[in-house]
C-alpha cells in the first residue's frame, strides 16, 4: 500500500494520456469533500463541501477546502458533479462560485434543488444540469455515467468517469440498504457491468470500514420511534440533520399514527423539508405539519418539534434550548430524540447538550440508549461485497479519518487488490493514473480555509491560537508612555487583566520589574516602541509564569510623546 510522505514536493507535469486525481478535502477528516480530476488540461470537480468546526477552532462558522490549486484554472473547469445534497458535499459550492459563477453544477433533482436554494441566499444563479441514474453526460474530455446509490438522503449518485486514461469510479457516500424506504437500491448490477468493463481506479467511501457486518435497514428505526411516541407524556422534540429526508419521513409517520402535529424549527430545516415535500420526496398527510407559532394552542401531548442541532452545534436550535436561549423552553416530561450519528470530534458538544436537556427534566433518547439511528455508510461486509463485484485494478479509499482509510485499504487487499495498487492519500496529495497504474506524484496546498462571519480565509491558525489563549488564559494589557527622544518612562505603567484570574491590584508587584526593564533599555539607547513592547512582554510573562503558572496573552502598548 502506497502512502503519502511528509516531504512530498509539487507534482511534475501530468504525463500525456494520464489522469490526475487531487483530493482537496475529505481524506483524513469527515467533511469538506472535494476531488479534482484532470485530463488533457481540463478539470472536473466531484463535490465541494464544508467541514464543521471543533472546540479548538473558536468563532469559526465553517471550514472550506483550499481552492488555491484551481484558482488560476477556473476557466479549465468543465463542471462540478455533486453526488448528493449533504452539507459536507455541497456546502462549499457557493464560495467556489463566488470566484466564477458560471461553472456548471451537475447533480440529481433533489441535490440541485438544495444547492439552488443555498445559492439563492448568496445571490448566485447557477447553471445546472439535472441527471439521474443511468444517464451519461460528456463534460469536456470526461464522460460521466451516473449510478444510483443508497444513502441517508434521497437521490444520491455515484459517478463513473471515463477518459482515454481509463475509467475511474467515485462512489460518493453509499450503503447497501436492501429495504430502503424509497425502494431505491444501490445499483449493484450497474457496478457489476462497470467492473466487467474494467474499473481502473475506484474511490470508495471509508466512513464505516472499521464496522463489521452490514448496516441495518433504515426502516428498523420505525418500531423504536413508535415505542418512544407511545410512551411520551408531553412534547416530543426531534433533532436531525436538515437533509435527512428518510429520517424525517419516519418521524412524520409516527406523529400521524399517534395523533400529533409536527412543526419544523430552524431556517435550514424549514427550507429543506419544504423542498423535499414540493418535489415529492417527503410524504406529508394533510394537516400534519403546522407553523411553530400555532403550537401554543395545542396540548403538549399533541406536539412534535423537528429541529437541527443533533451534533451539538452552538447556534442550532437544540443547543439553544439546552442553554435556555430559545423561545421553546424545555420542561419536565418533554422527550428529546437525537436521531443522528455522532460525527467524530463532536462527542463533547453533543453530551453537553444532552446534559443540558436532562437538567431541565427532558428524557433524552439517543444512539447510546436506543436504536434511533442507522448509518448512511457501508460497513465492512458491504465494502467486501462491493469490491468483489467491482474488481477494481487500483483502489483509493476516500471520505474518512486516517483509521477509516487504512481499514478500507485492508478490506480491499483482502479481496485480492494488490497492495501496491492501493493508494492511501491525504488532502492535497496528487495521484496520477498512468498506463493503468495509480501512484502518488506530489502534493499541492490543501489547508483549512476558515469562514468567520463574512470573512473567508482571513482567519489563520495564528489567529485561532490567540483565540484559544484568550479563552483559556485571558489577557493582560500594559500601557506605558515614554519620551520619544530618551526612551524614559513619563507615564504608567498601567496594568489591567481580563479573564486571567489575577486581580488588578496584584500587578503592583510587577510594575517595578517593568520600570527596571524600561530604565535599562533607556540606558542602552533602546527607544523603538516595538522593542520596548517585547521587553515589557517578557518581564510580565516571566512574572506571571513564576507566580501563577499561567500563560495569558500579554498586550503591551507603548505611546511616544
Image (spheres, rainbow, N blue to C red):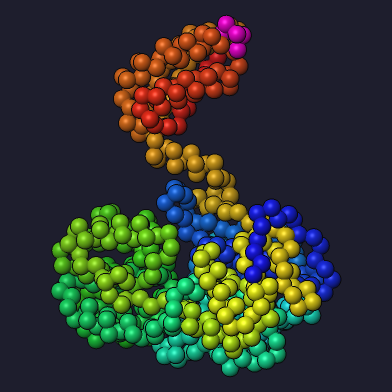
Q: How many marks?
A: 0
Q: Nearer the viewer, residue 271 or 561?
A: 561
Q: Is residue 289 above or below residue 75?
A: below
The answer to if 202 sits in the magenta stretch is no
561 lies left or right of 231: right
Q: Nearer the viewer, residue 166 or 280?
A: 166
The answer to if 523 sits in the magenta stretch is yes
Give residue 398's position: percent from left, percent from top. Answer: 58, 70
Give residue 170's position: percent from left, percent from top. Answer: 62, 77
Q: Main secondary structure of the magenta part?
A: loop
User: Going 54% across and 52% down the picture, which residue do you hit?
Assistant: 450
Instruction: State the quadrant of the N terminus.
Output: bottom right
Give residue 539's position: percent from left, percent from top. Answer: 47, 20
Give residue 281's position: percent from left, percent from top. Answer: 44, 84
Q: Is residue 230 above or below residue 542?
A: below
Q: Is residue 283 above or below residue 338?
A: below
User: Going 25% across and 57% down the picture, which residue do you hit?
Assistant: 356
16 lies left or right of 314: right
164 lies left or right of 337: right
Instruction: State the quadrant of the C terminus.
Output: top right
For this orientation, the residue located farthest to the right is: 16
Q: Which residues are magenta?
A: 522-526
Can you see residue 156? no
User: Going 48% across and 39% down the picture, which residue do you hit?
Assistant: 466
Amino acid at each position: 500500500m502506497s502512502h503519502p510522505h511528509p516531504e512530498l514536493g509539487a507534482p511534475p507535469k501530468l504525463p500525456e494520456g494520464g489522469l490526475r486525481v487531487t483530493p482537496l478535502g475529505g481524506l483524513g477528516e469527515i467533511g469538506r469533500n472535494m476531488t479534482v480530476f484532470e485530463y488533457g488540461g481540463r478539470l472536473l470537480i466531484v463535490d465541494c463541501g464544508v467541514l464543521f468546526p471543533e472546540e479548538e477552532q473558536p468563532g469559526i462558522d465553517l471550514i472550506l477546502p483550499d481552492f488555491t490549486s484551481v484558482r488560476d484554472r477556473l476557466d479549465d473547469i468543465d463542471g462540478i458533479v455533486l453526488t448528493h445534497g449533504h452539507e459536507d458535499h455541497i456546502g462549499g459550492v457557493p464560495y467556489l462560485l463566488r470566484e466564477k459563477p458560471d461553472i456548471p453544477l451537475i447533480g440529481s433533482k433533489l441535490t440541485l434543488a438544495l444547492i439552488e436554494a443555498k445559492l439563492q441566499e448568496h445571490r448566485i444563479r447557477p447553471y445546472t444540469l439535472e441527471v439521474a441514474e443511468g444517464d451519461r453526460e460528456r463534460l469536456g474530455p470526461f464522460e460521466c455515467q451516473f449510478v444510483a446509490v443508497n444513502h441517508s438522503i434521497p437521490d444520491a449518485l455515484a459517478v463513473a468517469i471515463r477518459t482515454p486514461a481509463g475509467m475511474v469510479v467515485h462512489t460518493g457516500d453509499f450503503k447497501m440498504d436492501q429495504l430502503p424506504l424509497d425502494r431505491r437500491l444501490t445499483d449493484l448490477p450497474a457496478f457489476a457491468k462497470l467492473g466487467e468493463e474494467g474499473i481502473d481506479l475506484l474511490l470508495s467511501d471509508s466512513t464505516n470500514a472499521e464496522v463489521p457486518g452490514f448496516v441495518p435497514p433504515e426502516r428498523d428505526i420505525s418500531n423504536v420511534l413508535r415505542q418512544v411516541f407511545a410512551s411520551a407524556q408531553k412534547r416530543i422534540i426531534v433533532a436531525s440533520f436538515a437533509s435527512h429526508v428518510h429520517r424525517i419521513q419516519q418521524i412524520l409517520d409516527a406523529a400521524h399514527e399517534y395523533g400529533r402535529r409536527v412543526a419544523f424549527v430552524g431556517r435550514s430545516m424549514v427550507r429543506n423539508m419544504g423542498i423535499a415535500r414540493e418535489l415529492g420526496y417527503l410524504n406529508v398527510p394533510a394537516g400534519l405539519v403546522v407553523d411553530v407559532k400555532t403550537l401554543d394552542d395545542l396540548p403538549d401531548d399533541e406536539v412534535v418539534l423537528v429541529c437541527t442541532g443533533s451534533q451539538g452545534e452552538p447556534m442550532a436550535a437544540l443547543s439553544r434550548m439546552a442553554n435556555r436561549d430559545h423561545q421553546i423552553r424545555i420542561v419536565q416530561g418533554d422527550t428529546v430524540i437525537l436521531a443522528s450519528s455522532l460525527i467524530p470530534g463532536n462527542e463533547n458538544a453533543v453530551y453537553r447538550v444532552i446534559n443540558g436537556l436532562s437538567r431541565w427534566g427532558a428524557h433524552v433518547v439517543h444512539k447510546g440508549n436506543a436504536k434511533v439511528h442507522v448509518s448512511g455508510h457501508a460497513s465492512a461486509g458491504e465494502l467486501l461485497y462491493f469490491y468483489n463485484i467491482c474488481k477494481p485494478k487500483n483502489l483509493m479509499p476516500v471520505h474518512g479519518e486516517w483509521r477509516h482509510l487504512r481499514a478500507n485499504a485492508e478490506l480491499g487487499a483482502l479481496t485480492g487488490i494488490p497492495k501496491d495498487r492501493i493508494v492511501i492519500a491525504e488532502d492535497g496529495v496528487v495521484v496520477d493514473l498512468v498506463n493503468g497504474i495509480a501512484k502518488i506524484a506530489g502534493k499541492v496546498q490543501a489547508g483549512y480555509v476558515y469562514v468567520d462571519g463574512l470573512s473567508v480565509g482571513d482567519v489563520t491558525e495564528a489567529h485561532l491560537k490567540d483565540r484559544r489563549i484568550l479563552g483559556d488564559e485571558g489577557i493582560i494589557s500594559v500601557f506605558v508612555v515614554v519620551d520619544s527622544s530618551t526612551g524614559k518612562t513619563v507615564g504608567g505603567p498601567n496594568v489591567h487583566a481580563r479573564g486571567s484570574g489575577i486581580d488588578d491590584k496584584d500587578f503592583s508587584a510587577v510594575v517595578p520589574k517593568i520600570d527596571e526593564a524600561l530604565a535599562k533599555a533607556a540606558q542602552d539607547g533602546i527607544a523603538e516602541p516595538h522593542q520596548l513592547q517585547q521587553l515589557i512582554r517578557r518581564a510580565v510573562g516571566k512574572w506571571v509564569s513564576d507566580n501563577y503558572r499561567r500563560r495569558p496573552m500579554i498586550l503591551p502598548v507603548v505611546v511616544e510623546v
